[in-house]
Image: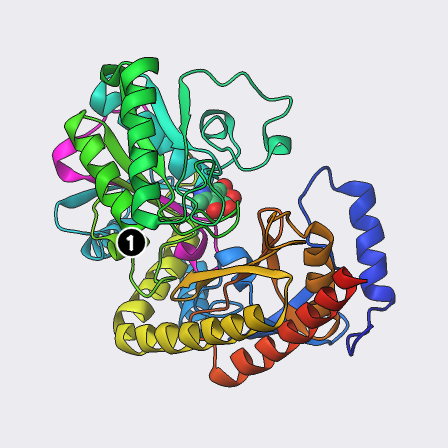
Amino acid sequence: MGKINIGRRTNSILSRDRKVMLTTTRAPYPFVPDHGEGDIVYDVEGNRFIDFSSFVSVYNLGVGGNAAIRRSMTGQIKKLTHNAFTDYYSERPVRFAEKLVSMMPRGFGRVFFSNSGTEANEAALKFSRVFTERQYVMSFYGAFHGRTGGVLGMTSSKPVQKEHFGPFPNVIHAIYPDTYRNPFNIDDADELSDACIEHIEKDILGKGYSQKEISAIFIEPMQGESGYVIPPKRFMKELSRVATENGILLVADEIQTGYMRTGKFLALDNFNVQADIYTLAKSLGGGTPIGATITRTSLGDIPAGSHANTFGGNLLAIAAAEASLDYVKRNMRSLQRNIKERGAYIMKRLGEMKDKYEIVGDCRGIGLFIGMELVKDRKTKEPAVEGLEDVLKECFYNGLIILPAGKSVVRIIPPLTVSQKSVESGMDILEEAVKKADAKSKN
Ligand SMILES: Cc1ncc(COP(=O)(O)O)c(C=O)c1O
């Protein structure tokens, strides 16, 4: 197909995987990564790829973390790796929590550590029930908050994720203001925002549920898994008002949008809004499993023993996370410049592609959180599901790792340190793939 050769080693791993692994979601190409650095990754065959995926939004500072992250982990391995942090005491997680709090808006001072995004959200769900003594929770259609029992009810991204696992009591879904696809058929961002807020205030709170029973509104500041959807600024401000007026906590799931992806530590800062609880995971650990739930200090504490885990605050994960955050703090200016400049270049190239290829329905992004939606027809906006698969495969076989989101969105999330050279080469490969898919769709 392209310049990438897939041989016996890859095929053997794939067939053994199929026999022994229970269930997974997998990209539509046979990628078996072996090692990498920065924005370059090699597979087990020795093929070289540019990474536009950050390994599903984890390696924000580059494939394999970076030298400082690896050094920090190596140092910690020589001492303890497990510290039973929810039973005993340990300085390093406390120090990291203090550093994390210093990145948050003023008034945020309490941190709970877990091992993943879904766990960070489970904690937020439980904490908001304790803080408010209310049982219901609101989230949005299209949301992805994880896959464990509690938060799965709030997830509403793909039916396959929930089929067999319900019912999910005490969860209400509202309409997310997707400016490209919305049931109101409104193009104007402010009008769409008003329609969505009216739906929450008049239909959900006015008719369906007593606001006195709703503990929290969970929201991704920009929806990730369901298609890199960016809401209008006005919506987030208004949603914050609705939450405050009704004594409902606003929980920002920053698991995919946070950690500098948009150029700010928290994506919600792009909307000049503050939440009451933030959740972080994915890139927080620089390649190790860690989740964090960070609450507004004024919300207080939760009863001792009402929530805990074995590995939260694990020293190996904390060592990586601390080195990663130290790097971010030390290199804030240059990181922000890189995110802005590389993001602007990608958006410019996507705009040009939209002018040339009918299959490109929409391009959107903030910083290096970027999506390109492919459609069969610009008028009907029918998702180009096969077109997306073709594009992803074509990119892979020409040396670019790139992931999907939603039904037909190309998700462009390179490491935040990506070089201009890699961005240009990656966009050249992507454009060739889109050109082919566009030509195929016309036949
Ligand atoms: C916004 C968001 N929340 C939660 C999660 C779940 O995180 P994890 O897979 O670490 O459980 C994800 C994962 O994709 C996510 O994107």
Asked whether the viewer can see residue 371, the reply is no
Across and down, in percent, residue 316 comes to: 43, 55
Mark 1 crowdedness (10 Å alpha carbons): few <14, some 14-19, many ≥20: some
Residue ID at (32%, 14%): 207
Asked whether the viewer can see residue 98, the reply is yes
Residue 12 position (above or below residue 43): above
In the displayed structure image, the side of residue 232 where residue 109 appears, left or right:
left
Residue ID at (74%, 61%): 390
Disc 1 marks a residue whose amino acid type is Arg
Residue 66 found in image quarter? bottom left
Which range is magenta? 282-306
Q: Which residue is tagged 1?
A: 92
Across and down, in percent, residue 178 comes to: 43, 45
Residue ID at (75%, 71%): 397
| Magenta region includes residue 300 | yes
Across and down, in percent, residue 403 comes to: 61, 58
In the displayed structure image, the side of residue 436 where residue 150 appears, left or right:
left
Residue 49 position (above or below residue 137): below
| Magenta region includes residue 432 | no
Q: Residue furthest front?
A: 379
- Viewer-closest of 203 and 57: 203
- By what rule are the colours in the image chosen? rainbow
Q: Secondary structure at mark 1?
A: helix
In the displayed structure image, the side of residue 288 where residue 35 appears, left or right:
right
Residue ID at (61%, 64%): 402
Residue 95 found in image quarter? bottom left
Residue 2 position (above or below residue 384): below
- Viewer-closest of 108 and 317: 108
Screen quadrant of the C terminus? bottom right
Screen quadrant of the N terminus? bottom right
Across and down, in percent, residue 232 comes to: 33, 50
